[in-house]
Image (spheres, rainbow, N blue to C red):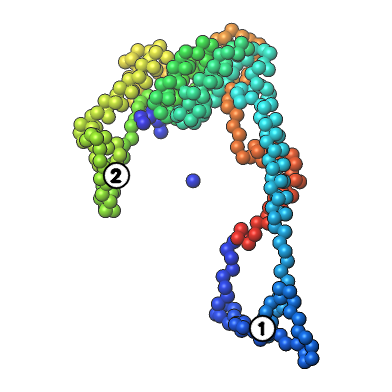
Amino acid sequence: MPTDDNYWGNPQAPTSPSQGGAAQQAAPFAQAATAPPGTTQQAAPYASAFAPAPGAPAMQPQQKGHGWIIAIVVVVALLVFALAAMKSCSDSISSMSSLGTVGGSSLDALNEDAIAIIDIAGTIQYDGSACSPEGLKELLDEAEEDDYVKGVVLRVDSGGGTATAGEEMAAYVRDFSKPIVVSSASINASAAYEISSQADYIFVAKSTEIGAIGTAMQLTDLSGLLEKIGVNMETIVSADEKDSSYGYRPLTDEERAYYQGMIDQINQVFLENVAEGRSMTLDQVKELATGMPFTGITAVENGLADEIGTREDAVEKAAELAGVSDYTTTDLYFSSYDISDLAYLFSEDQSKYETLLGLLSENQGPRFK
């Protein structure tokens, strides 16, 4: 996929003679116990037919197991615990919003004008987060539909990612009807910059790495290595070029030219988006499309950014463009839940939780030690 990138108790063994002395051997058939003369020997019901070997410890009567009772208790306890946890989890999650919050409340709780802030931090890709087309669109739609949200700030800290994802996200920013301002953090490059270029205004820090306009495709040729280690890859294909990107053989000149044409075509989309978003000519953008990033200082000079400023400056600019002076800010984001969240929910009844763990530990059996 072309990218606009800038850049996981052992059971004890029997004791051998050398390790603990010779093991005591029991007589295969020990002599039956005899009664004193003149007495009648009575065999105890179910008693062993053989007496223990001399010196051997006396055999203890086998106790009837109660493991099934413990098992039933454990199963019932687990069911009760699971039902209680599910209810607690459901109640907690239902009181939380999956999207933007103001002091822990959803956007529905807003009762005054606000500027929404969306963090785009990480690789631009298809992962459902704010760094993906689907995620960003959902957040922008949330801001679009809320009458109290007057503008948006995109806090960008990304070195780029998948070209197509960047293209789609740029379109969503361009089509957003309310003022949208970019606050660049340490890096705003490649596909991330393509997205940013569609905003109404771009802030940078002096040391921000920004731009890196260009497209790259990586193809690895492993044929030399495979030959050295004696591996022969044989691929059955429907067309001669089908395995060109597999890395088992070098590219032909024709294949290399073909991929170059793809990159040029994809990069043209990038250039046109930047030109449109920054109100520049295509030639002006081409001069800056070296694939290398610029500092924030240089980006302001060459037109890729508008002003040196902070996140707060970007918020103020968004409010200015929206024509509001009395406003608050709110973060738009996706809530995430993991095992630590469940542990927090269960901690409300820590004593029962620890009792259950102890019971399970005692009845695990030797194979788990």
Query: Where 122 falls versus 74 (above or below)?
Result: above
Query: Where 297 falls versus 339 (above or below)?
Result: above
**299 sits left or right of 52 in the view:** left
Query: Where 352 falls versus 120 (above or below)?
Result: below
Are the residues tagged 1 and 2 within 8 Å (C-beta)?
A: no
Q: Residue most toward the right?
A: 38
Measured in 3D between alpha carbons, the distance from the residue under mark 1 to the one under mark 2, in whole angstroms, is: 71 Å
Looking at this view, is 314 or 46 the one in front? 46
Looking at this view, is 25 or 23 the one in front? 25
Place of residue 181 in the rendered image (x, y in percent of width and height, measured from the top left): 52, 17
Place of residue 296 in the rendered image (x, y in percent of width and height, measured from the top left): 46, 24
Badge 2 density bin: few <14, some 14–19, many ≥20, Cα 10 Å: few
- Amino acid type of disc 1? Ala
Q: Is residue 187 visible?
A: no
Give the mark, 1 or 2, whose residue is nearer the N terminus.
1
Q: Looking at the figure, which quarter contains the C terminus?
A: bottom right
Q: Indicate the quadrant where residue 95 lies.
A: top right
SS under mark 1: loop
Q: Looking at the figure, which quarter contains the N terminus?
A: top left
SS under mark 2: loop
| Residue designated by label 2 | 222
| Residue designated by label 1 | 53
Q: Residue 97 — which label? A: none
Place of residue 238 in the rendered image (x, y in percent of width and height, measured from the top left): 24, 35
Query: Where 277 falls versus 252 (above or below)?
Result: above
Place of residue 124 in the rendered image (x, y in percent of width and height, measured from the top left): 45, 28
**Discs 1/2, front:** 1
Q: Is residue 62 visible?
A: yes
